Image: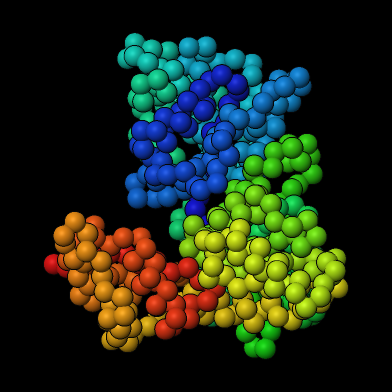
Amino acid sequence: MRKSVVAIVGRPNVGKSTIFNRLVGERISIVEDIPGVTRDRIYAQGEWLNTTFNIIDTGGIEIGDEPLLVQMREQAQVAIDEADVIIFMVNGRDGITGADDEVAKILYKSNKPVVLAVNKVDNPEMRENIYEFYSLGFGEPFPISGTHGLGLGDMLDAVVSHFPEKSFEEEDDLTIRFSLIGRPNVGKSSLVNALLGQERVIVSDIAGTTRDAIDTPFKKEDRDFVIIDTAGMRKKGKIYETTEKYSILRALKAIERSDVVLALIDAEEGIIEQDKKIAGYAHEAGKAVIIVVNKWDTVETDEKTMKEFEQKVRAHFQYLDYAPIVFLSAKTKKRIHTLLPQVLKASENHAKRVQTNVLNEVIMDALAMNPAPTVKGQRLKVFYAAQVSVKPPSFVVFVNEPELVHFSYERFLENRIREAFGFEGTPIKIFARKRN
């Protein structure tokens, strides 16, 4: 089930970034920044009324030397393409300007909910001046103040009220949904075409929940799969070619809807920092992950090449030590047959449950092998453990004092669980709780 997307749009200098940063800084609606966000903080994950959503700040689009109206249209168009709800922000001190009218005209055509926020209304006397904004045609204007943090709750109440009703995927629970992520030109489209062309059992193309992603179901050995293709992330038009930061949001949407995520690396170009950031999104989301080294046909290989490249991958992606590595060529279809079995295995492990009694036998054996440490004269006592959820598999370990559970010991317990039960391809989470 994907998160709704909220975009803040408006002409320059109305306070879009100020409101965004205040929401983040004051933690009124924003819980945390999504890992890997660029320094201009284009988007973050928010929460209001127990509902989480992604929020975009379009204030980072630079005006440059181009005409103002062209830049405004580009900003508004980004919001139209990405958002479920749009916050249209204007400046209460300036009144309605011609530039506001231009943005409004574009938003009229979007057929998407628009919440009108009148910023810089810093005192009660100024509230009387907001009524002219009714003429923009978006209903009640909400007076807010980025400087003082006033009115944000009422504005967010209105935003959340427009979110689509929660809906779950129609596919059966046995359907394995996997997406492909990676920087441009690593071969995402080619890999999708290689998988579907080889199997030749496409049922139909179904439009995904995002405008740029296509869900393609197919069967392989009586198993149902759905590929969520994010390869078409960069649309035509200058704004999409120059603003790569918005492609990250599209990838996040696909990750949310996936059971397994394929993180693609270009074997010819090698590993770069962007590869690690992109794969990190899937890890933070708790999804099963497979590292796919594509374009293996372009590499001169001997008996040591694959092993050496694998060591490089492990060194760069230490947080993904559970993820299998698949080497293939989408272009020549070399080793393409090795991919789907890994997807199936990772999906099964992502949803795996273990029996409580067997789990506790493993934990007690681990404690006997490596007794819990003593911290400041107090020894950690582990009483029992239980699996509390799947996707990803999550475990609660009941102890005498959670503060005594050091990261290194938690890692030790995770390794013992993995040795006993597998869980290749999926992250697992361990939480320490005090026994009542």
Q: Position of residue 362 (x, y in %)?
A: 33, 83
Question: Is 35 in front, or is 205?
Answer: 35
- The answer to whether 120 is drawn above or below residue 387 in the figure is above
Q: Establish if 424 lies above or below 121.
A: below
Lateral position of residue 193 relative to residue 144, left or right: right
Where residue 374 sits in the image (x, y, percent)?
22, 64
Identify the residue at image location x=27%, y=81%: 368
Residue 75: where, in percent of width, then height? 65, 32
Q: Within the image, what quadrant is residue 263 found in?
A: bottom right
Question: 37 or 92, which lies in front?
Answer: 37
Q: Residue at x 67, y 69 (%)?
A: 310
Q: Nearer the viewer, residue 332 or 174?
A: 332
Percent x, y of residue 342: 62, 78
Q: Quadrant of residue 207?
A: bottom right
Above or below residue 301? Residue 99 is above
Residue at horizontal 44 percent and vertical 81 percent from the top: 419
Residue located 38% across and 40% down the image: 29
Judge from the rendering whether residue 209 lies leftward or rightward of residue 338; answer left or right: left
Q: Is residue 7 visible?
A: no
Number of residue marks: 0
Q: Examine the rendering and report whether any part of residue 198 can be seen.
A: yes
Q: Quadrant of the C terminus?
A: bottom left
